[in-house]
Image (cartoon, grey):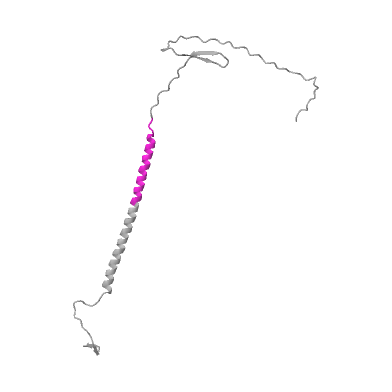
Amino acid sequence: MYPEPAHHTPAERAVTAYQPTPIQPVVVQPAPVVPVQPGTVPAVASIVLPDGRIVTGYAIDHPQPAPVVAKPAVSRTAVSVALGGVGFLAVSAGLLLLTSFIAALTAFIGQLIILAAVIFGGWIAVQVLGSSGHRGGTTVNIRRAVFKRNHFHS
């Protein structure tokens, strides 16, 4: 599968030496001078580098960003969502009170019906179980009663 390794003596090996290629110095062309008429003469600044060289140049004014339009502290969407939540809470509380009122009214009407049934039933019971005699008629006290031939004689 793999080729057999070939054994060579040290004298047979070829030695290859690599030499680095020197870098040619790049010739820097000075930039063309373009005359500019500034409104004001910019300040000249000099900087001393750590190796002793002095670099002199003009100070560059950094461009100022455009002013940002002031945004409100809270977005209108957040205010709308909050107001919607408060409105939903108020409606939910109102519906809860409405259902509680309906339940209380239903219980009250049920109690009135039961009370009317008790009073009317009591009135009927008094009428049925009360005195069944005739009112306004003659009262007869029977002390001795004589029954002869299925007739009552007093």
- The residue most toward the bottom is 148
Does the segment drawn in magenta span residue 150? no
Where is residue 127 shown, x and y percent of the image? 26, 72
Front-lying residue, 6 or 59: 59
Q: Quadrant of the N terminus?
A: top right
Q: Main secondary structure of the magenta part?
A: helix
**Placement of 25 over or under 138, stated as above or below:** above
Residue at position x 37%, y 37% from top?
79
Image quadrant assignment for residue 38: top left
Magenta part of the protein: which range? 71-98
Front-lying residue, 48 or 129: 48
Does the segment drawn in magenta span residue 93? yes
Residue at position x 30%, y 59% from top?
109
The reply, left or right, for residue 30 in relation to residue 42 is: right
Residue at position x 33%, y 58% from top?
107
Where is residue 29 shown, x and y percent of the image? 55, 10
Where is residue 7 shown, x and y percent of the image? 80, 25
**Placement of 99 over or under 11, stated as above or below:** below
Q: Quadrant of the C terminus?
A: bottom left
Front-lying residue, 4 or 46: 46
Residue at position x 38%, y 39% from top?
82
The reply, left or right, for residue 29 in relation to residue 133 is: right
**Placement of 9 over or under 119, stated as above or below:** above
Where is residue 150 shown, x and y percent of the image? 25, 88
Image quadrant assignment for residue 146: bottom left
**Placement of 100 over or under 125, stated as above or below:** above
